[in-house]
Amino acid sequence: MEHKSFLHIISPVKDKMYRLALRLLVSKEAAEDATQEVLLKLWSRKEKLKHYANIEAFAMTVTKNHCLDELKSKKNNNLKIVHQNYENKAFSLQKEVELNDELNWVEKIISALPEQQKMVFQLRDIEQYEFEEIEKITGMKPTAIRVALSRARKQIRERLTKKHDYGIAKN
Amino acid sequence: MELRKIEQLIKKYEAGETSIAEEKALREYFSGTTVPEHLVAYKILFAYTETAKKQTYNADVNLPKKKKAYVWSAAAAVIILALGVFFYQNNPIQMRDTEMGNLANSEADLEKTRQAMQMVSDIMKEGSEDLLYIKEFSNTKNKFLLDN
């Protein structure tokens, strides 16, 4: 497989890979590094890549595994990822809706969720994958996916309602 | 969409049981401007999922180019080898031709060669005469050794 055809296959997926890495690793630099490394991994296995029916799901699985490994090794080194250094430029575009603050809340609430819930929420509510695809990517069972998703959604909604009410009471 | 229907969908959504199509309907509803007070949290939630999807991976994709470099260096090696073999095989033949021509030329050449050889042999003889001094040297040495 040549560079061009590889890039052609991978370019629609690479943003999704990056967003998943960003969700799990929180810092932008770490997510970019992880994405680059996963792309290299896929490139080195490019001959096998042709035989996968669903290359996108495979790429996402490799990304997920890589990020979880990264988190594990960071925890072993007693290093915690500080999420204050994470600045999201995409939000500034959203000023006209005046939701800027609220969107940052969501970001923080999600970053406090367990890894599995983060992952499932990312894949379903942001990337809008079907449940079968999420099964393939995460290797989780359908019921486990639904439970994790339900917990994540409820948690985000509850925290948001609390914050929102608090904000109104303060005014 | 009716508020009651939306509330039903939200229940399903929180249980993790909505389909992609139903979630799309929710997303569309909450992208509207007016939303009842008790549903504001969902408006924020869905707005977030929309913006989060807009993030892109902007860094360059760097792939190694090892394979191509190998092909080129292999090609270069083959060319160098071919040139080497070509020149090696051509040159000796040319040299032999010229040498043969000179040797077969005349008797005078043979005579000159003989003279040159003679000169070398004369010089060698002169050198070996000088070696006689070494004999004298060993005579002196023996004198001392035998005395002791």
Image (spheres, rainbow, N blue to C red):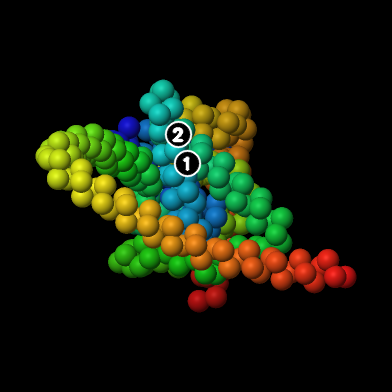
Q: Quadrant of the C terminus of chain B?
A: bottom right
Which residue lies at the image location 38% right of the left edge and 44% below the top edge?
Answer: B66
> Would residue A60 be found to the left or right of residue B91 on screen?
right
Q: Position of residue A106 (x, y in %)?
A: 50, 58
Where is A156 relative to A49, above or below? below
Q: Chain of mark 2?
A: A
> Would residue B74 be found to the left or right of residue A144 on screen?
left
C-beta proximity under 8 Å, tags 1 and 2: yes
Which residue lies at the image location 65% right of the left edge and 57% below the top edge?
Answer: A74
Q: Which residue is mark 1?
A: A41
Nearest the eye: B69 or A169:
B69
Q: Secondary structure at mark 2?
A: loop
Where is A81 relative to B19, above or below? below
Whole-number angstrom distance, CA of label 1 to CA of label 2: 6 Å
Q: Which residue is mark 2?
A: A45
Is there any visible trace of residue B7 in the rendered image? no
Nearest the eye: A17 or B31:
A17
Q: Position of residue B128 (x, y in %)?
A: 49, 59
Density class for disc 1 (Cα within 10 Å; few <14, some 14-19, many ≥20) is some
Where is B25 relative to B116, above or below? above
Q: Position of residue B93 (x, y in %)?
A: 19, 34
Q: Chain of mark 1?
A: A
Is there any visible trace of residue A43 in the rendered image? yes
Which residue lies at the image location 49% right of the left edge and 51% below the top edge?
Answer: A34
Q: Amino acid at mark 2?
A: Arg
Q: Secondary structure at mark 1?
A: helix
Q: Which mark is residue B44?
A: none
Marks 1, 2 in one chain: yes
Nearest the eye: A15 or A6:
A6
